[in-house]
Image (cartoon, rainbow, N blue to C red):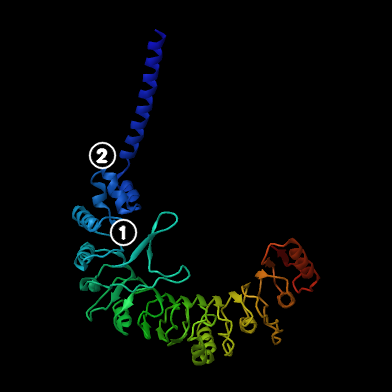
Amino acid sequence: MAKSVATRSESKVKKLKLDTVLDMDDRISNLPDSLIYHILSLLPTKQAVATSILSRTWKPFWTQLPTLDLKDQPTNPPNTFTYSMHRILALHRAPVLRNFSLKWYTPCDSFDLDTWIHIAIERNVQQLKLEIYLNAEYEDDEDGSVSVDFNFGDDVNVIYYGELFFLPRRLYSSKTLVVMELTGGILLNPIYSCEFPSLKILCLHRIYYEYDDSLSRFLSCCPILEDLSILRNGTGGLTELKISLAKLKCLYIEFKPFRLEPSPGYKLEINTPALEYFRFEGYLRNIIFFEKPAHLVEAHVKISSELNRNEDWLDDWISEYKIYYGDWVFKLLRTLNNAKFLSLLCEDEKCIGFGSIYPSRFQNLIRLNFELNQANWHVLQALLIVAPNLEVLVVKCYDNGERLCWTEPLHDPGSLSHLTSFIFNGCEGLEHEMEFVNSILMKAIVLKTMTIKIKVSDRQLKESVLKKLLMFPRHSTTCILTVE
């Protein structure tokens, strides 16, 4: 009898648990369709398709999603994903495709790729992302993921030497594209009748260009482009680049040097009168702005090192380029003197040993991020003189080789008169560093905070630096000193 009661009790508990689960399922199924579509649109397409097995109610949801995010898996048997792609696109019914993303890393018939891209264009795709490597190799990372392996070390950017994919001609006349991102083994060769009347954001990441004018012809088809990113190992076959865009607001250029050969020369002409944000990273050659960007707000310049490599061609490179390198750097900086925010890093120790920032003045500059090495103290000194309205100064000392001492700049009554915040990263308490800090304390009459961040965690060094700071005379008696 007791056993029977216990059995009935267990049955009631199980029924209660089952009812709870069913109620939970009902709550999910009863969500508004718009919310379910939104949730599924955040998933990769493969996972969204998998939800169709949950119930008949869920089966059609993924077919109406306005996004497709598809990625080839190199571990799949040959042609398996090709078949899956055709199947997915055949079942997909969304009349408008907002986002289409395709990552492909294995051999594939270009006809198939063209077909899939055509389908996206026919459905008025607004955001298109293509990353294509037709014959890449793969290896398992330590965490089990799959990555492209081009037989280069981890310290070198990926360089692709495989078969290139020609973009379908139909793509060059898309009237609905707003965002386009192209990456990898893609060859850009725009037709002369190309047109992108709606394109506002364009990213060209390590793709290839058939002719020197391929880029400029492509950009001429983008009348309202506002954001442009060009990333390359070397120049991708380009020696003369022209960027002429009347509406462009953001420009990011990255030219990383090759490890196995000298970085090629190039000439970059920029005509972007509406530019507000500029970022350059990589090795520098001749960059020419047709006119100074009058509306520039933010500029970041990071020049990669070439002089510290030991290749046989290095001596020839130094003799050919060293004398011009400083002029290129300072010419670029002088062009950017309308910026309100500026960051500067020159990894080459001697790349700015020649040239001068004068007579330009950075009248609008209110924040400066500057990375010091033993060769560019004089550049920082010059910038402090020509930026009378500077409010925030952030300095990072990343190279302590053969140090050059801080030299007190020429007296300028307006120098540092508006500085309110100073941060010094990587300080070691060295004599020339403390002379520099002392100079800031003496000249910054409205300084509110000074933060010194020691390079290594050393309590005695922190105490020593703080003791020196407290002994320095300072113009601003309300300044808060911090040593971290």
Badge 2 or badge 1: first in the primary sequence: 2
Q: Is residue 70 above or below residue 30?
A: below
Seen in the image, is 154 located left or right of residue 139? right
The front one of 142 and 383 is 142
Residue pointed to by mark 1: 74
The mark lying in front, picked from 2 and 1, is: 1
Question: Which residue occupies the extreme right position in the image?
Answer: 471
The front one of 257 and 434 is 257
Q: Name the amino acid type tagged 1.
A: Pro
Q: Is residue 124 above or below residue 475?
A: above
Task: Look at 23% across and 79% down and name the residue there.
Answer: 191
Q: CA distance from mark 2 to mark 1?
A: 30 Å
Q: Is residue 198 above or below residue 333?
A: above
Helix, strand or loop at label 1? It is loop
Q: Is residue 49 above or below residue 237?
A: above
Residue 207, horizontal then vertical, whole percent: 34, 74
Residue pointed to by mark 2: 55
Task: Look at the image and tell me whether residue 223 can be seen.
Answer: no
Quadrant in the rendering for residue 225? bottom left
Seen in the image, is 233 located left or right of residue 85? right
Residue 401, horizontal then vertical, whole percent: 65, 78
Task: Look at 72% across and 62% down and name the residue there.
Answer: 458
Quadrant in the rendering for residue 83? bottom left
User: Which quarter shows the N terminus?
Assistant: top left
